[in-house]
Amino acid sequence: MRFTRTKLFARLSPDKFVYLSDVFANYENFLENYTRDYCPADTTINDFKPSDGFMSLQRDTFKNLFDTKVYTDFEGIDPNKPNGLIQFEISRRFNIKTSRIQVRNSRSDIGWLTYFNAFGSLNKIEKDKRVLELRNEDVVRDNQVISPYYATSLDIRRYQNFALGGELNLFLFDWPDGKMTSYFDIGAVYGHTPLAQRPLNVADPSVRRDSISLSGHSSTIYPKISVELLSEKRIGFVLSFQLNRTVLFSNNNFKPIASYAKSNLTSRVTEPYARNSHMVECYIRAMPTSNRDGQFFFRARYFVQQRDRNTFFAQFQFGYSYNIKLKGFDI
């Protein structure tokens, strides 16, 4: 029934069209029993000449399991920077609602709730800058340090060595003639950051006690807007912006701040805007061969603290992306 209402327009004559049912006279999908996989497997289509028999479309026997990325950060070459020289990322995209709505008579369409993208990453921080050391103003009262340990929210993000999260697409706009697709997603990420603090020896302030290892746990939620340009199948370009809202779970052992220069470093109260930051990302991919399983990519990211543009850091990553596949796997 949907085929009888779907129009196929002539490329140079937007007022001329045929219905999809004129192309596919009969469409019947044979599904295997005891399965929830409703992708076309052995599909039979009755074309314009039924007397010639049926045309069978076979589903690919290779299944994409995960998209993996192995990359390095150019900033990690500098021993004073905490970006990992070798980093690893894995993701899987699950399609949800694949139908689209055509925008009037134009060659463009919109969709919503089209996919969910799950991902995780392991970031190897080099030995020179492996752990984020917390700071303290060492305000002492009654032989006790009453000032909090602290670090900027962006430093806690910068030293993050593990992340796990997902993104849900809310809206999609596709413009094939312009070779452009735009997305609006919402995401949530859990992050882990190794921390260390060196307590002050109140009896002898010139000497600090041994370092104590801590773990920083954070959750970040964000809206994300992306524009993807597909000039050709071998090259792609994506520009994204997202607004991060990060909450840290520290058992009151430390607090996040917005700026080392402008925040109140002696108060235990967290500034509300210290939890907010912005990220701009540019992603470029290039497929060197006809093999679509692998491609090189370059990703540049810029993080900036809300209300303090002088608190920021950048990432410049180059690596290789590869689809892990399994042959002859049936759901």
Image (cartoon, rainbow, N blue to C red):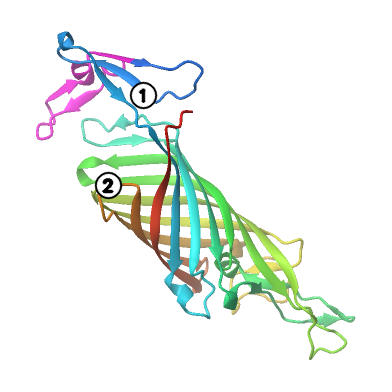
The correct choice, above or below, for 199 with respect to 322 in the image is: below
Does the stretch in magenta take in 61? no
Q: Residues within 10 Å of mark 2 (few under 14, many from 20)?
A: some
Report whether residue 271 is seen.
no
**Residue corresponding to mark 1:** 40
Describe the element under mark 2 as helix, strand or loop: strand
Q: Who's the residue at 68% across and 76% down the image?
A: 265
Image location of residue 271, percent across then percent down: 64, 66
Q: Residues within 10 Å of mark 1 (few under 14, many from 20)?
A: some
Residue 315 appears left or right of 285: right
Magenta highlight range: 1-28
The N terminus sits in image quarter: top left
Q: Nearer the viewer, residue 324 or 221?
A: 324
For marks 2 and 1, the one nearer the N-term is 1
**Residue corresponding to mark 2:** 180
Q: Who's the residue at 63% across and 64% down the image?
A: 193
The correct choice, above or below, for 109 with respect to 31 in the image is: below
Outermost residue to the right? 142
Q: Quadrant of residue 238?
A: bottom left
Report whether residue 185 is seen.
yes
Callout 1 amino acid:
Pro
Q: Nearer the viewer, residue 165 or 188?
A: 165
Q: Comparing marks 2 and 1, which lies closer to the viewer?
A: 1
Q: Quadrant of residue 8?
A: top left
Q: Nearer the viewer, residue 252 or 237?
A: 237
Image location of residue 107, percent across then percent down: 21, 35
